Amino acid sequence: MAEYLRNAWYMFGWEQDIGQELVSKTILGRQVLVMRSSDGSLSAMDDRCPHRFAPLSMGRRQGDTIACRYHGLVFDSSGQCVHNPFSDLIPPGCKVTTYPLEVKHRGVWLWMGDAEAADPGFIPDFSFLDEPGHLLSTFHIGADYRLIIDNLMDLSHIEFLHTDSFGGGGSILHGELSVREEHPYIYALWEMDNIAPPPWATAMVEPGAKVDHWLDMRWSAPGSLLIEIGLTGAGAPREPGIIPPLLGAHILTPETDTSSHYFYSTAPAAQSPVDPDAPKGVSALEDEDKPMLEAIQRAMGDAEFWSLRPAILSVDTGSVRVRRRLAKMISDEQKATFETA
Amino acid sequence: MAEYLRNAWYMFGWEQDIGQELVSKTILGRQVLVMRSSDGSLSAMDDRCPHRFAPLSMGRRQGDTIACRYHGLVFDSSGQCVHNPFSDLIPPGCKVTTYPLEVKHRGVWLWMGDAEAADPGFIPDFSFLDEPGHLLSTFHIGADYRLIIDNLMDLSHIEFLHTDSFGGGGSILHGELSVREEHPYIYALWEMDNIAPPPWATAMVEPGAKVDHWLDMRWSAPGSLLIEIGLTGAGAPREPGIIPPLLGAHILTPETDTSSHYFYSTAPAAQSPVDPDAPKGVSALEDEDKPMLEAIQRAMGDAEFWSLRPAILSVDTGSVRVRRRLAKMISDEQKATFETA
Amino acid sequence: MAEYLRNAWYMFGWEQDIGQELVSKTILGRQVLVMRSSDGSLSAMDDRCPHRFAPLSMGRRQGDTIACRYHGLVFDSSGQCVHNPFSDLIPPGCKVTTYPLEVKHRGVWLWMGDAEAADPGFIPDFSFLDEPGHLLSTFHIGADYRLIIDNLMDLSHIEFLHTDSFGGGGSILHGELSVREEHPYIYALWEMDNIAPPPWATAMVEPGAKVDHWLDMRWSAPGSLLIEIGLTGAGAPREPGIIPPLLGAHILTPETDTSSHYFYSTAPAAQSPVDPDAPKGVSALEDEDKPMLEAIQRAMGDAEFWSLRPAILSVDTGSVRVRRRLAKMISDEQKATFETA
């Protein structure tokens, strides 16, 4: 069983995807229910009645409360039992565990740790999503979230894995990777200067013209990543560029030890005429990343990553830095909990 | 792995459902075979040849014996190997474990514990089934048998779970639950006096007339329950009633730690014109109980029931009493085994 | 988890079935890749890149090397990383574990233990396969390989299990089993003298004529068996016989603890007019052995064979001798490893 960072914000889903229906998902191995109240606010609680453990998501909405479908106990959005059909007494302790929830930058964020420590200021900055036009998607990969972070912090794989979608052509190999830390972020910056344009951009420049191209990835714990994809004339300033920089969110939430929710955004300029991730009709995420990451998860089985003694390449600098940081955060948190207890 | 009560009768199936074919089922985690001999008698044994562990249910009937399909060893209904095709010698210890079996009240009952202690007098009284006309059914639920006992000992759920079949309407909420012990039975009696008739009975009484309605549930260890459903005019004696009391068997046998065989009967008067459990075309058992109980089993995972600290309501009196009793019987049995050993 | 004999040759597949495509199979619980180089030679290695554990079988062939599909590391047939797209340096330790591989008698054999000890002379003699005309097949059974060896070393089951294909009729019961050891082989010899011909051979002899019939099985560790099926006139010498002796390979390689690869050959004379294993349109292996062996595996669950205290018959002499020998070889090997370490 994986140890998760508890005192952190995990994305539950996109706010737009939560309507009047109760939404239940497995998050960090727990079944969690999110409901929207009539004032539009959202709340999160365990999807399990404290009486006989019926999923509350099978229950009935009654205004801003949920009546359990099994024996009719009614719970409000704070998880408190507010009605017992069999008595005027609410049994002591008849309360569902709730989780701090924040809606920010169009995402719904949950805090699975110590509620006192749940500071919305810790939600990473995805304010670019507040601009109109970003397409928000939800995806699922049968792999540990850290394998997906590895994938994103080391974009060199574009050259080899994404040859049927948007990659290949050698741009990546002409680049330099630098890794920078700026609390609470770790950046993996891939800069390709004075290169032939990448395949997806050839039509945008004069034949023979060279470009500067960059892929800037920003990670924050536990699994929130922001990419900036840029393209400008060789030697020209980044802005305005041949295209304005494309920003994309890639936000990962562990479902179980070996599966993850994957939430991402597609920038307006990248949505037409075709999905930029799939200029050849092949989806980079669906058809290339997902099968590879799931095959790796199967190959690893139950083994811990470092126990398999992975060979380390220069391009792993970012992903290794993130793995080390995350492991230290989890270890520090557990030590603190132990000392407090 | 659940600890089961060993010295007890478990129902294997309805006698009517066992013909000349060998019948094999998992009972308490063991694969058990029941065969009918030419004199009509039934016998039960492990469905596993002691030689190379071939399922005997794959074998061939030869009169009142079974020839193993793999190497032809022949076993009689006492489990004894009576023919070895390769020698006149029967190998010592070449015997299949058998189980005491009794046919009573149309059920086939097995004793999985100490054979010496297998007293048919301990089979609970379902003699009403010897009356003609009861419809006998077999069902399967992917949940621990004790979750199903909870369901039956606390019928308050009719009001909330069975709204699409026969329940709802509020009758249950006007009732009183009393729990009574009368060795070896525990009764949960739900009495609803002077109420509007339940939905399924409205056509049976004058508009506006009140009724007395009762649901008497009787449990005996490990999982044998008998329900009496009654309806009479408000204040009138129980007999003859508006309808004669309907008796129904609900008998549960653990298949595995998380699944159960469910055997039940439907009274003649309840069989027409439509299934009383499904006046609206929805089956209470199939469409309402089963999905709920299986969802609860999934929600509980491997956790022991009490370790999840369930909230306790007044309506749980019967089910909690049964859980405590059953746990004590199992614990006493294990202590006795330990002291004897 | 089963303990396997490590210092032994296991068959990976038939040489004819390995073309230019990479072939990946689970062998002894490990995912192993076999590739054919341009000079026709074969090599075997773990199907897992040492960098981020991507299956190399998802990679691209580049001449006699494989480029990992994830980050482009290139490996030659010795498992050595020979190209790192991101640096002139090959990371130390960037090497895939390889396995000694030999092609002999049309089979591809792997050595999963100490490479120094991999002597091709230990590959069992199946030189008859070098004669033209043998049909080579591959099959899969969801059972421990030792259960399949039991099946082959005790052919008495032909009489009872193979009644719908080629068996039954009683020939087997008129035979004598003798077991002989001749290092490194153990033989189980089934001789049926002066009997009516077996069902599949009745058309080959005069009505009423008697025959001598034999089934000679030869085992060598861990799971390589050779059968000779013979038929001659009663009292006549074995050669030339009514038919020349039919030789068949039955070679078993553990896939996992509860599943096996099954490689077998069919002699030319046995291929027409109909499959001799299926004169009645029923395949002995597919329709009779496989369901039985898989049912036995399910019946045994996780239990160790001897812990279930199997009854022992005279016909088990060969299979028990093999089980004991194999267990001793494994135990000796582990002791030796322990002393060396």
Image (tube, coloured by chain):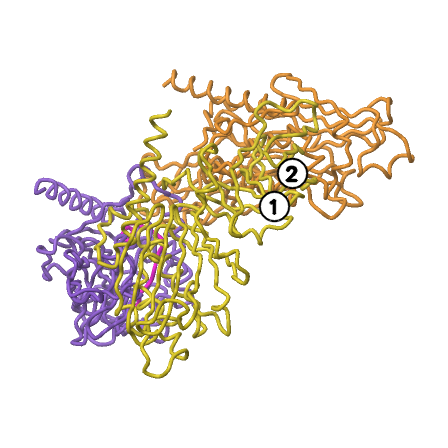
Chain colours: A purple, B yellow, C orange
Q: Does the magenta run of residues contain C175? A: no
Where does the image place residue C148, in percent across and percent down from the top left? 59, 34
User: What's the magenta region?
Assistant: A137-150
The answer to whether A60 appears left or right of B270 in the picture is left
Where does the image place residue C82, in percent across and percent down from the top left? 40, 40
The quadrant of the image that shows the N terminus of chain C is top left
Circles 2 and 1, Cβ within 8 Å, touching? The answer is: yes
The answer to whether A123 appears left or right of B301 in the picture is left
Q: Which residue is mark 1?
A: B22
Which mark is on residue A4?
none
Residue at 32% over, 58% down: A171
Closest to the observer, C319 or B178:
B178
Which mark is on residue B66?
2
Q: Vertically, is B225 above or below B37?
A: below
Residue type at mark 2 is Ile
Q: Which callout, 2 or 1, points at the residue further toward the start of the chain?
A: 1
Dot 1 crowding, Cα within 10 Å, few <14, some 14–19, many 20+: some
Q: CA distance from mark 2 to mark 1?
A: 9 Å
For residue C191, say whether it is visible. Answer: yes
Residue type at mark 1 is Leu
When asked about the image quadrant of residue C2, the answer is: top left
Closest to the observer, A110 or B281:
B281
